[in-house]
Amino acid sequence: MPRLTVVVPCYNEAERLDRGPLLAFVDGHPDASLLLVDDGSSDATGAVLNAVAAERPGRVRALSLTPNRGKAEAVRQGMTDALAAGAEIVGYLDADLSTPPAEIDDLLAALARPGVQVAIGARVGMLGYDIDRSAVRHYLGRVFATAASLILRARVYDTQCGAKLFRAGPALSAALAGPFLSRWAFDVELLGRLLIGTPDVTPLPLSAIVEVPLTVWHDIKGSKLGLAGMARTLRDLAMVAADLNARRRAAAR
């Protein structure tokens, strides 16, 4: 089992999935594998994922979930499956490849730093970086990030970028033990669970989580998360906040 497994949640991606960059990633990383999760798609996504997996046996796997459970559960099931198979590092990447797979290298470099357990991509528009994001999404993202920072009690720039890596360990296993409450704001839930821990599992220190500015990120047409979805995600944050506060109380007992 390769030491790194990247989960790619897919829902109705038969016409859009670009297998080239995914196969190039595993070809260039002998210690990495991909787990493509079909989240109850109604098109031919399952067949497409199986075909991609057949091109790199042992390096690319396909997992089918039925019925559709949402991105959060697809990611959780995929990461749990990868950990059970022995992966030392797990993570996820959006199927539209708005974050190119090659960006995983910078996240891996961050994980190699002493004490770092989690590396999350951040879409920061700076000179010399190719970050193509609509103004509306950018400013809504700033509102979301402010709310997420308050909920997590930690300053974070971008919780929602679909590019994250995690080292295997008790805190991660505990954080993935139960389904997420939110279909889209689950990234905040996951980070919160890691930072809070459980009565039996020590939480990660804030210093164990680092944000890594991506060098390339492009808005891709056909995103499953439109403006209405982003509004629902903001509402989800209230539910996530209540759950994390309850977890804090339980962990403090």
Image (cartoon, helix red, strand yellow):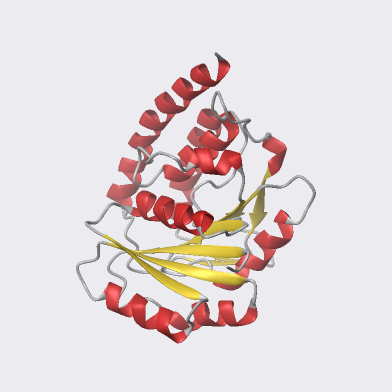
166 left or right, relative to 54: right
- The quadrant holding residue 217 is bottom right
Res 225 seen here: yes
- Whether residue 162 sits left or right of residue 74 in the image: it is right
> Quadrant of the rendered structure where residue 121 is?
bottom right
Residue 112, x across and y down, in percent: 75, 57
**Which residue is situated farthest in the bottom direction here?**
55
Front residue of 45/176: it is 176
Percent x, y of residue 241:
43, 28
User: Vertically, is 155 above or below 218?
Assistant: above
Residue 39 lies in what quarter of the image? bottom left
Residue at 33 percent of width and 35 percent of height = 235
> Is residue 132 at all visible to an observer of this figure?
no
Name the image quarter holding the C terminus. top right
* Residue at the (61%, 72%) spot, across then down: 102
User: At 54% across and 71% down in the image, what residue appears?
Assistant: 33
Residue 131, x across and y down, in percent: 56, 64
Q: Residue at x 56, y 57 (%)?
A: 90
Question: In the picture shown, does residue 65 fall above or below 250?
Answer: below
